[in-house]
Amino acid sequence: MVFVAGPLIFFRLVRPAPSLAQFRLLAGISFSTLLVSLALRFGFLGRWGSDPSLTWITVGLIWIAWVGILALGVQRLRMADPSVRMRNWTAVLGAFGTAVPWFGLASAHFMTG
């Protein structure tokens, strides 16, 4: 699911041409999802880890913030170099980057048994 949804969300976020308004939107999306996830994480300390839905929602929101930050970085690179080559490379690397946190979670789960 995340290996399909992540790149799709990423491509949707980087579709518009880079601009100051786009930077503000991406920063707002990333910052707001991060704040909501932290509020859920620390606002419900007693349920964190024992309530799977709360835990997964919080982790999902952190992941959406990660995808937003990737999109923000990609748009900045595209503004610095608007060539087709930069657009293609940032699209590939950004789409791959959306799944990186899940590889880390899978590795941690594998190591702990």
Image (tube, grey):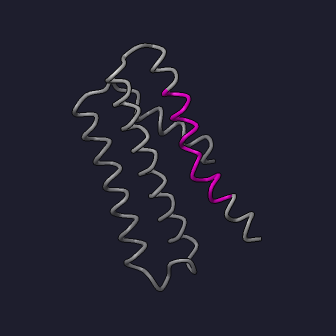
Residue 67: horizontal and vertical position, in percent? 46, 45
Q: Residue furthest bottom?
A: 46
SS majority, magenta:
helix
99 within the magenta span: yes
100 within the magenta span: yes
Left-right relation of 39 to 110:
left
- Image height check: is 48 above or below 18? below
- Image height check: is 92 above or below 111? above
Q: Nearer the viewer, residue 7 or 87?
A: 87
Q: Residue furthest right?
A: 113
Q: Residue at x 72, y 71 (%)?
A: 112
Screen quadrant of the C terminus: bottom right
Residue 96: horizontal and vertical position, in percent? 58, 37
Residue 4: horizontal and vertical position, in percent? 61, 40
Q: Residue at x 36, y 17 (%)?
A: 82
Q: Residue furthest left?
A: 20
The part of the image, by quadrant, that contains residue 18 is top left
Residue 72: horizontal and vertical position, in percent? 36, 38
Q: Residue at x 45, y 21 (%)?
A: 87
Q: Residue at x 28, y 34 (%)?
A: 22
Counting every numbered tag in the picture gives: 0
The part of the image, by quadrant, that contains residue 62 is bottom left
Left-right relation of 15 to 110:
left
Left-right relation of 71 to 96:
left
Q: Over which residues does the magenta segment extend? A: 90-106
